[in-house]
């Protein structure tokens, strides 16, 4: 494959950077550029491309922060569900769970899941951030997937101590009384124990910045954002996307049921324009 001329490289790189794509993704999807990720950053720093360094969403180091959620007050729910117990269990596969809040004017919330092995990200819109709303999403997923597939996906869940997760028995027990999952809680003030979902939220916030009202969102919008996030190649997956990694772990039917699909590499967009342009 022939090397691209400088002006041709500019034409490829600039619009992709403006779409929020990281240099690693561009390098993986465009080997004809013959540029390493480090070289691409260097050229951007030197202003050799029309895209600027400031346009990049550099990977930020995750810093555990104080959680401002309303916390679970009934400590009995943590019995046999602590992080220490989770570590002793050492499950081969587990899922991290969290919530992302809208602006203060809106009560809508996103319930999010992250599969560390596949780097797969899921999000579901809730009208309120309550225990009942979380259980509603669980029941909806069990209905769509079936109890067996739900159990195979969500066998073990790790989450924080937000009050919306304060009824673990309701989440663990399926609609037919069958145990469908096991809930474990991070230690207080230790959100870094589920750092994967926290990092996924940084990509989500590229499309939905803090202070954005979720009132205008539909589940279709949320699915669109999720599919773009899951179509970004990851170095930890040897250049594969989370979608492709999940396709190897789960059946194609499960991914379709979750309304997941692959986005073409050059169409991936992690900016607020993603939602504006698709309305």
Image (tube, grey):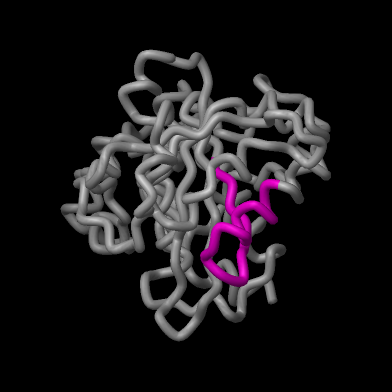
Q: Is residue 170 magenta?
A: no
Taking depth in this image into account, of 35 and 25 the one nearest to the observer is 25
Q: Is residue 137 magenta?
A: yes
Q: Which residues are magenta?
A: 121-138
Q: Locate residue 159 relative to residue 277 in the image: left or right.
A: left
Residue 204 seen in render = yes
Q: Is residue 238 above or below residue 103?
A: above
Q: Which residue in the rendered view is the most extreme toward the bottom? A: 105
The x and y percentages for residue 22 are: 39, 47
**In the rendered view of the protein, which quadrant contains the C terminus?**
bottom right
Residue plotted at (62% across, 31% down): 181
The x and y percentages for residue 65 are: 21, 52
The x and y percentages for residue 99 are: 47, 56
The x and y percentages for residue 79 are: 40, 31
Q: Locate residue 199 relative to residue 121 in the image: left or right.
A: left
Residue plotted at (45% across, 42% down): 26
Taking depth in this image into account, of 273 and 158 the one nearest to the observer is 158
Residue 1 seen in render = no
Taking depth in this image into account, of 97 and 209 the one nearest to the observer is 97
Query: Splitting the image into 4 quarters, where does residue 182 fall?
Result: top right
Query: Splitting the image into 4 quarters, where does residue 211 fall?
Result: bottom left
Residue plotted at (62% across, 73% down): 217
Residue plotted at (76% across, 34% down): 177
């Amino acid at each position: 494959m022939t090397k691209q001329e400088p002006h041709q490289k500019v034409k490829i790189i600039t619009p992709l950077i403006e779409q929020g794509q990281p240099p690693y993704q561009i390098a993986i999807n465009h080997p004809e550029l013959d540029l390493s990720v480090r070289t691409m950053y260097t050229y951007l720093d030197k202003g050799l491309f029309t895209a600027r360094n400031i346009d990049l969403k550099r990977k930020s180091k995750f810093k555990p922060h104080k959680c401002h959620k309303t916390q679970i007050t009934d400590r009995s729910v943590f019995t046999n569900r602590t992080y220490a117990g989770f570590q002793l269990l050492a499950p081969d596969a587990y899922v991290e769970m969290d919530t992302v809040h809208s602006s203060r004017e809106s009560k809508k919330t996103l319930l999010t899941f992250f599969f560390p092995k596949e780097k797969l990200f899921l999000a579901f819109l809730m009208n309120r951030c309550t225990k009942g709303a979380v259980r509603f999403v669980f029941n909806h997923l069990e209905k769509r997937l079936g109890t067996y597939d739900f159990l195979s996906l969500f066998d073990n869940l790790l989450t924080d101590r937000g009050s919306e997760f304060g009824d673990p028995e309701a989440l663990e027990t399926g609609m037919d009384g069958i145990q469908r999952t096991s809930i474990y809680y991070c230690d207080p003030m230790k959100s870094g124990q589920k750092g994967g979902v926290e990092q996924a939220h940084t990509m989500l916030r590229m499309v939905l910045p803090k202070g954005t009202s979720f009132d205008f969102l539909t589940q279709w919008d949320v699915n669109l954002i999720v599919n773009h996030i899951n179509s970004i190649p990851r170095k930890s997956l040897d250049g594969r996307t989370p979608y492709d990694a999940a396709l190897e772990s789960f059946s194609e039917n499960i991914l379709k049921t979750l309304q997941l699909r692959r986005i073409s590499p050059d169409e991936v967009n992690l900016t607020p324009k993603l939602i504006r342009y698709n309305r």
